[in-house]
Amino acid sequence: MKNIAILGSTGSIGLSTLNIVRAHPEHFRVKALAAKKNADLLFEQAREFRPEVVCLYENQYAAALEKKLRKLRIRVVTGAEGLCALGTLASVDQIIFAMVGAVGLAPLFEAVKAGKSVAIANKEPLVMAGALLMETARQNRVRVIPIDSEHSGLWQCLEGRPQETIKKLILTSSGGPFRKKKGSLANVTPAQALRHPKWKMGPKITIDSATLMNKGLEVIEAVNLFKVPCEKVKVLVHPEAVIHALVEFLDGSHLAQLGVTDMRLPIQYALSYPARLDSLPSLDFTKVGALHFEEPDRKRFPCLELGYEASREGGSMPAVLNAANEVAVEAFLEGEIFFPGIPKIIEKVIRQHKKIKTPGLADLMEADQWARQQAKELL
């Protein structure tokens, strides 16, 4: 029996994680749940899974939630301190991090320092502070498990294989909703950009898929997770989204991880590792048909190249890229800028940034706030 905490339990990753717990109650027990502001859903989850403690990050509804949970003897905490309390809870073996934005950084580092196994679904920790996080995990002998489908695929292909045998890591992309669109992207709407051809995800990551920034961020993640230079990380457009990642070795051999487009697959393996559990849908090769691959169009989707640039620069630059992207994506969703304005704002912000070569966590948080302010001023 593994005791888990889920930070981001009301989002898509959190909901999928709880579905896995429902399917395997003999293997997993929920000890803590955290949400940003969805108090109603958090209450329903707490009533079903009976954790020791829940955290509602935004505290205006916390008093009402606490009153409702008092009869169940479930403690309610709030804010950044509350998240850190969940990250270090003595009864928890593993923590699923799925909170969007930089809010999950401090509790993640606290969890690692407390010796907790961590499974990371959101990109921000491994983009903003990946190098620092992996070093902290090494010092504390903590395993960092990726839930992102592509990095989970790489992790599974690389397991137990010497670093010096790797020639290339290959991340696949569906190409997003505009892969086949002809002409200018200037007038595409948020509604069009949110129609992802393969995955059902939150709005921010779906827009990142449309701009290919998700792949730019994934390049940074792969560099930090697997300790390879970004020149060894390649992105291929694979519209069927059956192969999630490939590894090419020095002798020209390739290993690939394949599966259905269902986030429960990487989540469940992160929870059950090194075991594998049943209950997920199988990939039917007779229905897959042909598999196609093509190079991404970096001129049409410049966010991918910006990701490579930030990875090469290192230091505080990935944190700045990530923050500027978050502001730009939100502005696009609100109708404040056109679709091509997203990479333009990001590029202007990273050009203005004076990189900190070896930042600490406080430096990264400061760079994050600086980039957000710069991006908002550009709007």
Image (cartoon, helix red, strand yellow):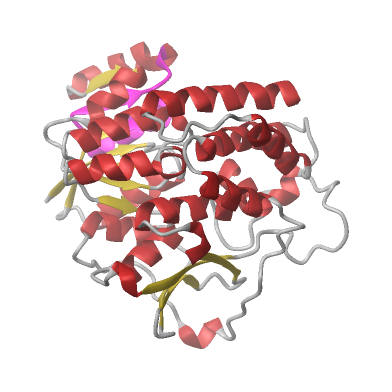
Magenta span of residues: 34-59
Lateral position of residue 311 relative to residue 149, left or right: right
Q: Is residue 149 above or below residue 206?
A: below
Magenta residue check for 362: no
Which of the 4 image quarters holds residue 364? Answer: top left
Q: In the image, residue 368 lies at what x, y percent?
A: 52, 28
Q: In the image, residue 354 lies at what x, y percent?
A: 58, 29
Q: Nearer the viewer, residue 290 or 123?
A: 123
Residue at position x 45%, y 58% from top?
229
Which image quarter is the C terminus in?
top right
Which of the 4 image quarters holds residue 273? Answer: bottom left
Q: Is residue 95 visible?
A: no
Q: Is residue 348 visible?
A: yes
Q: Nearer the viewer, residue 200 or 337?
A: 337
Q: Nearer the viewer, residue 88 or 143?
A: 143
Residue at position x 61%, y 53% from top?
209
Q: Is residue 322 above or below residue 367?
A: below
Q: Is residue 231 above or below residue 54?
A: below
